[in-house]
Image: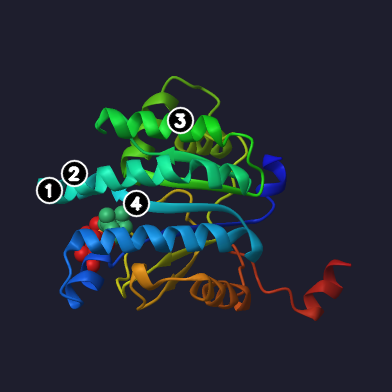
Amino acid sequence: MQSTLSSKLHIGIIMDGNGRWASRRKLSRLRGHEAGVEAIRRVVEAAPQQGVGTLTLYAFSSDNWRRPKAEVSALMALLRSYLANEIESLRRNGVRLTVIGRRDRLPDGLAAAIEDAEIATKSGHRLHLRVAIDYSARDAILRAATQASQLTDLTRERFAELITGEAEFRDVDLVIRTSGEKRLSDFLLWESAYAELHFTERMWPEFDAEDLAEALRSYHLRERRFGGLQAAPSELALTS
Ligand code: IPE
Ligand code: IPE
Ligand code: MG
């Protein structure tokens, strides 16, 4: 089943702008994060119908621990309730959920909710939803490098497996970042080596199925060359 999913697109989303969306409405930042969870529901529902096989969502970066304690605790509680409330509908919709990032610094309740959700959804084959929590791409690469130092016949594929924890892994095709910011903020650095980038002014709580479709339309208009050349008719003639 995983092989079917890895033949479809892998999209990574840096879900940014919850706080700004809320403060523009004179709401608390927490209300912004709550509205962000609604956007997650919309996108997870829409993604499989739009040709997406793997969706990696950046929910909490390892640098987000620098935020005020109250916001961090609220985010942890929100992630825990998202996982607990969503398990059944993810399972019904064929979504396999896995979480990437460090688990040892998470509150016990959240770590348990992650395990429950991963076990309950493990046979999902319509969409692989990866949620990045306490995630840092540089830390993931560093951990893989530590493990790799024991190996003698290291290949790119094997190293990618150590970084991602997945044997059959598709690189990221498209990274979307909301809220107008144009940076990667330590998200999927290895996996996005040839990813197309889509930046939108839309704040994450407003993001919906149509925004995803628009990002995908722009993606499909691009020409991915991976360092090669555009296949022009004359060149095709030379190789045939
Ligand atoms: C993204 O929204 C959610 C997390 C990083 C957890 P922000 O909270 O970063 O929202 P802004 O960037 O302050 O508007
Ligand atoms: C990136 O957003 C992390 C997530 C979306 C979870 P941030 O809002 O934390 O990133 P910076 O600090 O603006 O780069
Ligand atoms: Mg932000």
- Mark 2 touching mark 1, by CB under 8 A? yes
Location of mark 2 (residue): 73
Tell me the quarter of the picture where residue 137 sits. Answer: top left
In the drawing, does residue 64 fall left or right of residue 149? left
In the drawing, does residue 39 fall left or right of residue 104? right
For image coordinates 32% across by 52% down, the residue present is 186
Amino acid at the residue labelled 1: Ala
Q: Does the residue labelled 3 lie within 8 Å of ligand 1?
A: no
Q: Distance between the residues labelled 4 and 3?
A: 18 Å
SS for callout 4: strand
SS for callout 1: helix
Location of mark 4 (residue): 59
Q: Which class describes the residues within 10 Å of circle 3: few (<14), some (14-19), or many (20+)?
A: some
Q: Which mark lies nearer to you, 1 or 4?
A: 1
Amino acid at the residue labelled 4: Ala
Q: Which of 18 and 185 is in front in this view?
A: 18
For image coordinates 52% across by 57% down, the residue present is 44
SS for callout 3: helix
Residue 139's tag is none
Location of mark 1 (residue): 70
